[in-house]
Amino acid sequence: MIAKKVIAAGHICLDIIPDLSSVPEGQFKSLLQPGRSIRLSGVGYSAGGAVSNTGLSLHKLGVPTRLIGKIGDDLFGRQVMEIIGREDPGLTADLVIDPATPTGFTIILNPPGFDRTFLSLPGANDTFYASDLAREALRSADLFHFGYPSLMRSIFRGEGGELVSILHRARREGLTTSLDFSFPDPTGPAGEVDWPLVLANSLPLVDLFVPSALELTFLLKRETFNQLSSDPEIPFEEQITPDLLDELSEIVLGYGVKAVLIKCGHRGAYLRTNNATVFSKGGRGLQGLSSDWYGRALWAPAFKVDVVGTTGAGDALVAGFLASVLNASDPETALIMAVAAGACSVETITAIGGLQLWEAILLRVRQGWETLPLDLADEGWEGTENGIWQRV
């Protein structure tokens, strides 16, 4: 067990996952036509969103965790409570029930040969406010993680004013703050938000920033995002370069963020950290970290696995990283454990089904878990004995 405690707050929903495994690979688009019927092999339900995915992943890794999200007093809300309660009945104690709004839900379409598509109703997530965070809960923890502000209207509107208030609350109680994103809907209200301004307002209050490369490019470099997304036949992750991640992370670190972890899908994860002066003001969650964390640029390859489902894999990766930070690991171990937790997640249909205690996953890594190819030598980086690449 890891001694330090964490709060996972933000977006929560019920995930409804039709089993499309019987659909011939690559043919889903042609079958999804007006008047057509697609036969399912089954359907799965899980509690989703950052609160559930990241929070329950942290719980499975052995971190004492409290979950704070808002649900409705309805059938879907009761289902979310039941699913979370199966892991530990105490984890439902801090969920906020709003009888005036429905529980958010997401229908996840994940057919063979295609990336996932999400059909979402935000529901009660659009009415989450700083006042929903009990001071007693904040005082009991060492790290405060907030996830998916881009899916919560009350959080991103007004140039992110509510997000700033939430982060201020956590900082005042001495917590380390962590922030994750989900890709904003470009066709909805989130698509009209000035995201560089929202980040400029909120990142000075963030210690650990953990977006994906796709999300961060969209948020900070929209023109670059449009260029890299122009050909749907070329996966976005394949076009990520160290120079692009260096540029994006430089912007983030300029706001005073201690470390930015960028998820790169099947290409692993990139970690960039700030200097010693910035790290000296990081809250209880960062206490015990060594000077090895200062001024680093690292990239770890993904581990080789048989992929069953990718829903929540990014959240599990974040949980592996946060658990390692709370365990005062060195940056190399934290990065390796991040991609290892993400790899464990994709081995089952649910986000947390493949996760074990942090120590058990570390043992699997040390026993020689094979990684996918990653070669950054031509980019001016050098490999290390543990398989991580570092900028020279």
Image: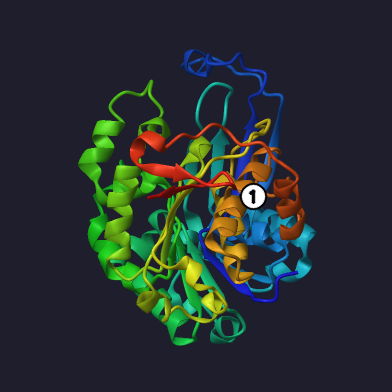
Nearest the camera: 110 or 315? 315
Q: For residue 62, what is the image quadrant?
A: bottom right
Please tell me which residue is depicted at 59% across the width and 48% down the height of the picture.
Answer: 386
Position of residue 37 measured from the top left corner of the image (x, y, whole percent): 58, 17
> Is 384 situated left or right of 58 in this image?
left
* Residue 97 in view (yes/no): no
Q: If the image is split into quadrants, where does the N terminus sit?
A: bottom right
* Residue 236 in view (yes/no): yes
- Is the residue marked by circle 1 packed among few (<14), some (14-19), or many (20+) residues within 10 Å? many
> Is 391 situated left or right of 63 in this image?
left
Position of residue 261 measured from the top left corner of the image (x, y, whole percent): 45, 55
Q: Is residue 308 above or below residue 334?
A: above
Coloring scheme used:
rainbow
Indicate the secondary structure of the residue bearing disc 1: helix
Position of residue 268 measured from the top left corner of the image (x, y, whole percent): 51, 42
Please tell me which residue is depicted at 39% across the width and 43% down the height of the picture.
Answer: 381
Callout count: 1
Please tell me which residue is depicted at 56% across the width and 37% down the height of the picture.
Answer: 108
Q: Is residue 60 above or below residue 286?
A: above
Residue at the left extreme of this rendering: 223
Q: Amino acid at mark 1?
A: Ala
Q: For residue 307, what is the image quadrant?
A: top right
Position of residue 103 measured from the top left corner of the image (x, y, whole percent): 56, 56
The residue at which mark 1 appears reads as 341
Please tell me which residue is depicted at 59% across the width and 38% down the height of the picture.
Answer: 310
